[in-house]
Amino acid sequence: MRHLVREEHLHVHVVPRNPKDGLRGFFWPRRRYPDEAGAAEVAARLREALEG
């Protein structure tokens, strides 16, 4: 038996970017981090936001 449950939710993709990865357009801007510390800061901010 198949049960269907409808649930409102937010769906997010965090996509690491690489040169020549084929993703183009406004929604997928490609920018370099200034350094490893900058990348770590973004990762920490994402983690904090997701954990609430």
Image: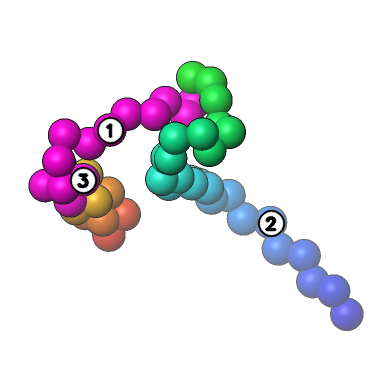
Vertical side of 2 occupied by 49: above or below: above
For the N terminus, give its image quadrant: bottom right
Q: What's the distance in space between the residues labelled 2 and 1, CA to CA?
A: 39 Å
Observer able to see residue 41: no
* Amino acid residing under circle 2: Arg
Q: Nearer the viewer, residue 3 or 33?
A: 33
Looking at the rendered structure, the kind of residue marked 1 is: Arg
Q: Position of residue 11 (x, y in %)?
A: 52, 47
Image x and y of residue 32, in percent: 28, 33
Q: CA distance from mark 3 to mark 2?
A: 36 Å
Query: In the figure, is residue 21 to the left or right of 7?
Result: left
Is 16 included in the stretch rendered in magenta?
no
Nearer the observer: mark 2 or 1; the answer is: 1
Residue indicated by mark 2: 6
Residue 32 image label: 1
Q: In the orientation shown, which residue stands out farthest toward the right? A: 1
